[in-house]
Amino acid sequence: MGKNVKNKTVLSSLFIIMLMVFTTFSANADDRTVLIGGEAFGLKLYCKGVMITKLDGFSSENGDVCPAEQAGLKQNDIITAVNGNTIKTNDELSDAVKNSNGKELVLTVLRDGKTKTIRIKPQKSDDKNFYTGIWVRDSCAGLGTISYYDTKSMTYGALGHGICDIDTGSIIESDEGEILPATISSVTKSKNNDIGTLNGYFQGMTIGSMTENSPLGIFGKLRAYPEKDEIYTIADKSEVKTGSAELITTLSGTKPQRYEIEITDINNDYKNSNTNLTVKITDKRLLDKTGGIVQGMSGSPIIQNGKFAAALTHVFLDDCKSGYAILAQNLVKE
């Protein structure tokens, strides 16, 4: 076994959020194959409604108030409708509140997967406008790395972890999004306790939709067959061992490169975890360019003994050359 990492401080996500923001198969993977990823991609993610990121009081003619808190709203609640009318954007909610003239509004709220009805009465602030005391977000965009393509089902998987709201830390409730090609233009290097980033931009047309944002990654449908021919069998968890492996990732432009890493520890008892493996970057070329693992590398596939073994998911804050990975067998959906 490799080094003990129980006391390591872990950065919870390697997906770069830019704000305005499984099924496992049987132990024998029956020689299932996928196209390997490694390309950077851009993601536009849309919430199921508008997510409450913060409750905030304000000054009114009745003193300091927070109607949202008084009504029982909470951070991470998702408002999906006002007075029965569907809400999809921040502006739609803002207009409904401003036009309420202080009359009670009936909100349809999604909380912990359950729908609730909450009544709220906006209050007039010192600027004579009506407010409820909430900050909300309806979307986010970011940069990550594709893990694999399944051309038989025309699907893909990426990141190896869910996309979380940068303010609340909760997985964003979403079943709608799109992925686009991305170009890496520069790298901000990592240092211990100061994790760097891949810097890039989206380009071209949408190449697929995002249909699931889950704790084990994002998944969706492809709109076009990838121009790749690197087909790999998915390694059974029993085949993944400590020792040398390869990481495929994109640090410049659009073309993935291969870099040497070491799998230092295996925790394959955790079937629904994205921290199955501990890995360490050993390739001098990668370390010279990035300093270690940087944000944006999340999802980078790992090859061992000619098979798709895992995908990178996390970096240790106090040891930026090391991080966690999810077993490919846990990542790939049947």
Image (spheres, rainbow, N blue to C red):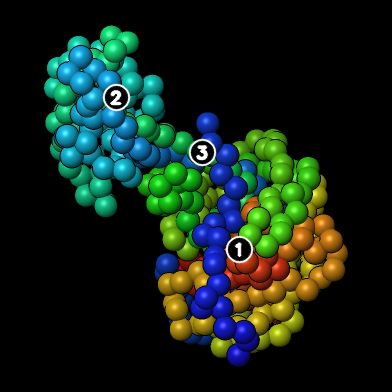
**Compared with residue 49, is residue 10 higher up or lower down, i.e. above or below?**
below
**Compared with residue 92, is residue 258 higher up or lower down, i.e. above or below?**
below
> Disc 3 or disc 1, which is closer to the eye?
1
First of labels 1, 2 by sequence position: 2
**Compared with residue 125, is residue 83 higher up or lower down, i.e. above or below?**
below
Residue 263, visible in the rendered structure: yes
Task: Name the kind of residue labelled 3 in the image.
Answer: Val
**Compared with residue 267, is residue 12 higher up or lower down, i.e. above or below?**
above
In the image: residue 8, left or right of residue 301: left
Task: Name the kind of residue labelled 2 in the image.
Answer: Phe
Residue 150, by quadrant, is: bottom right
First of labels 3, 1 by sequence position: 3
Report x, y in % for residue 290: 77, 57
Residue at the image point whose x is 62% and y is 66% from the top? 318
- Mark 3, residue position: 21
> For mark 1, does the 10 Å Cα neighbourhood hold few (<14), some (14 to 19), or many (20 or more) residues?
many
Report x, y in % for residue 299: 61, 60
> For mark 2, does the 10 Å Cα neighbourhood hold few (<14), some (14 to 19), or many (20 or more) residues?
some
- Mark 2, residue position: 58
Residue furthest to the front: 63
Marks 3 and 2 sit apart, C-alpha to C-alpha, by 24 Å
- Mark 1, residue position: 317
Q: Name the element at disc 2.
A: strand
Residue furthest to the top: 128
Residue 153, visible in the rendered structure: no
